[in-house]
Amino acid sequence: MRLTVPPEPKTADDHIGEGPPPGPGQAALLAATITVVVLCAADAVARSYPFGPRTRNVNDLGNQYVPFHAHLWDLLHGRGTGGLLVNWQSGFGTSFLPDLGTYLTSPFALLLAVFPRDEIDLAVYVITVLKIACAGAAMAWLLLRLRPGYWWAAGLLGASYALCGWTVATASYNLMWLDGLIALPLLCLVGEWILSGRRPLVGVLVVTAAWIANFYTAYMATLAAALVFLLRLWLADLPRRRRITAAGRAALTFALGIGLAAPLVTVVYFGSAHASEGRFTRFAPVGAEDLLARLLPTTYSFGSPALFVGTTALLLALALPFHRAAPRRVRAGWTLLVLVVTLSMQWGPTHLLWHAFAEPQGSSYRQTFVVCALLVIAAWHALSYGPLDRRALAAAAGLLALIAVVASGSQLVRSFAWPVFLMAALGALLGLILLGRKRPVLRMAPAALAAVLLVGAQLGEATATDAVATRMRFGHMDDYAPWGQRQQDQADAVAQADGWPRYRTDPGREQTVGNDPLEVGGQGAQYYSSHTSAVLSGTLTALGGGWTSGGRSLQSLDNAVTDVLFSVGARVHSPPDPHQNWFPQDGTGETVTREDVPPLVTVRPSAATGAFGPSPYRNQELLLGARVYTLPRITVLNGDGKRPDRSTDRRQGVRTGARATITARCRAGSEVYLWAPYFAGTARLTGPSAHGLTGRFRADFHPLTKIAAMQRLGTVPDSGRLTIELFPNRLGVVPDQAVGCLDTGRLHSVVRQLKATGATKVTVSGSGGTIRAQLPEGSKGVAVVAAPRIAGWRCAAGDTAAVPAREYHGLIAVPLDGTSSSVTCSFRPPGLRLGTAVGSGALAALVGLGAFGALRRVTEDFGLRIMTGDVHCA
């Protein structure tokens, strides 16, 4: 006789413990198909790459993300300089794991390997489209897991989520955020598995994958999934003990999943902790008109939450509170959750909570995809309980009309928005009305005709919204050309001149994007990342370097002294980028100049003394260890020959708002440099010894987002009198010690001395994390590595134990006592040891829990067999 255990009584939501309802695969495929069609059609309408001549590389997509993906391509094909630990191409040597974890750990990034190197922009586009399509598929699958319903409607709403305003207006050019768009429905699905007691191991691994892919948006998705899980737990009406057990399982699942991702998450966290502060915008909530306007199609702005999810989804979400077929608790719970989360975006403390208590740089509403997801889930709950009755549909239509009326007061609703909105609203209303009919219409089943209308409305308004966002973004943000002949010429010039690690090859001052070394090769100062270290930024700024993005996008510095300091033995010179149209083209191509420079590791007689001051010329001399500049007294006159007014703010110098001249006297033949960090415009040295028009001086002081780099203008004429003409673009400031005259003869003498006492051989490991240098016998003083002393470097002289590296005015330093003839420095990213320990603990706990669960199942099965008489003794 067998013992039969009766099942527990089912509640309204107990279908979550069963297998998936019919249709999730079809729904996911439909959502993905609609998404891909809309994205490609919108780019074709907007004439955007790859379906038109307009580049899609706006803002950070062109400056950061495409170059980082290019660098990953190089690493995957064994062509990159450096490895997973240190990126030797950027910023004279930077930690790479934080950048990898921030930009490149999505599984989709590996698809780069199948594309040619010169099609990196196409690879990034394909990855972007695939991510968005997968987000739609994941949401469609989740909706049918939450409640059964029309599979095609789940596919439609899944596409509504994937093509929400946040995606097309904000995340499509921040492609690492799209991993959070995928993670949110997947993490909610993990919550469903927890409620039903299924797939515990898979649930942990899904959490881990989400946090590894992009921990920033995964954090937001985790908060959202927790809210959805708590609401589902309340709606399930389970006994108190089962609720507590489910909550405990959820906490354990997410703790283990995040713990397994800790080796990468902690490295990213500490990378951010050591980064330059950058420029952060102060949060200010948007007005009600703008907030409601972003629910409508074809609205766009950078500083407001893009809440568009499609008119059909919006109508359904608005109808949920009035849909009497749905239980009251379902109506109240989902409606309140949408409202509370929406309001949380508008309040400072909860706004910071969504952003991990760090004010974001740039867009302030990065958590908007959470509200879009909740709107879509609320819409599905309205539809899954049956077609809307007249009362619910009328109430939803009235609320939609009210939203349109209030939103009409916003400047974000442009004239072309109304035809799109009215057509979408009409199609959505007719489709929802048809769903409630029983008789055929036009010889078609009402549901089939409704599906055609609803999908058609979705395709039209989503395509229009995406196309408008693409065009508006192109007009409001900086843009950069995709890979073309210019980048190929730069890459070829760098490859021919490359001599790493004997010397560095800088891809040039006239940059194409903010991360030129990653895109075209070489080893330069240029570097743009959220993890640009404060040490690197401060050191290069003190030496006369320029930057944008509040100090996080560092530029190349074309200066003879800094080339010596950082062993830049070859430098590519490119004409101004024709895509930017800043200067007329002179028809010249890429050229390469070479300099005699010391090795990457030099020996200085003593430890660093003194500190950097206000003059970059003197700071360069301090780091060099010799006087090579003459700083003449300058006279600045405006166009009418009068002295301009002095600056009244913290910028020391004279104001220049119109054409002006600088005159000074220096030794004939010396090189002339102009340092004017707060000057915007161009400068030219007059006379036959001039090098012609300089590169751009670009400064923006209010707010301080850009400063201009020091520029080489030419040589002092035989008369010793030099004149510099200034052509400002806006009001700027010229400092009192703006001009420096470099004695190249003295500099060459210093180089000969540094070469004589410097390293005889320098090697860098394949991973980039170790640099070794052979020194002349009996070397004393300090070995200085021409790399920024970022956190994580440990060095040893000879066979001694490695200790944290010393600092020599921002560079890596190792004391020498005359007994060692070698120096070894190794890099370990801060946080890696802590993360590895946490990850190992999480893995051990997961294995232990798995073994305990397996043992318990065996024991329970054996006990059940004894109770039922299935155990037989021989």
Image (spheres, grey):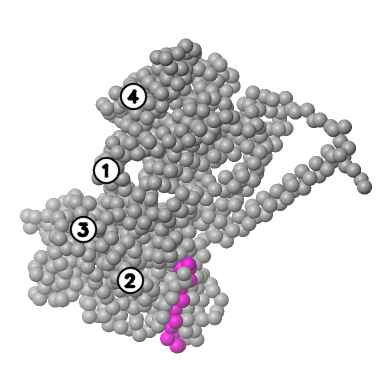
Kindly state the secondary structure of the residue where label 1 is placed: loop
Q: Nearer the viewer, mark 1 or mark 2?
A: 1
Q: Given the image, on which type of amino acid does mark 3 rest?
A: Pro
Mark 4, residue position: 421
Mark 1 or mark 4: whose residue is earlier in sequence:
1
Mark 2, residue position: 498
Q: Residue at x 72, y 25 (%)?
A: 9
Mark 1 or mark 2: whose residue is earlier in sequence:
1
Q: Looking at the rendering, which quadrant does residue 861 occupy?
A: top right
In whole angstroms, how far apart are the C-alphas of marks 4 and 2?
56 Å
Q: Given the image, on which type of amino acid does mark 1 rest?
A: Gly
Q: Position of residue 392 (x, y in %)?
A: 48, 15
Q: Given the image, on which type of amino acid does mark 4 rest?
A: Phe
Whether label 1 touches label 2, CB < 8 Å: no
- In the rendered image, the residue lying farthest to the bottom is 777
Mark 3, residue position: 576
Mark 1, residue position: 52
In whole angstroms, how far apart are the C-alphas of marks 3 and 4?
44 Å
Mark 3 or mark 4: whose residue is earlier in sequence:
4
In whole angstroms, how far apart are the C-alphas of marks 2 and 3?
22 Å
Q: Given the image, on which type of amino acid does mark 2 rest?
A: Asp
Q: Which residues are magenta?
A: 767-779
Q: Position of residue 181 (x, y in %)?
A: 47, 40
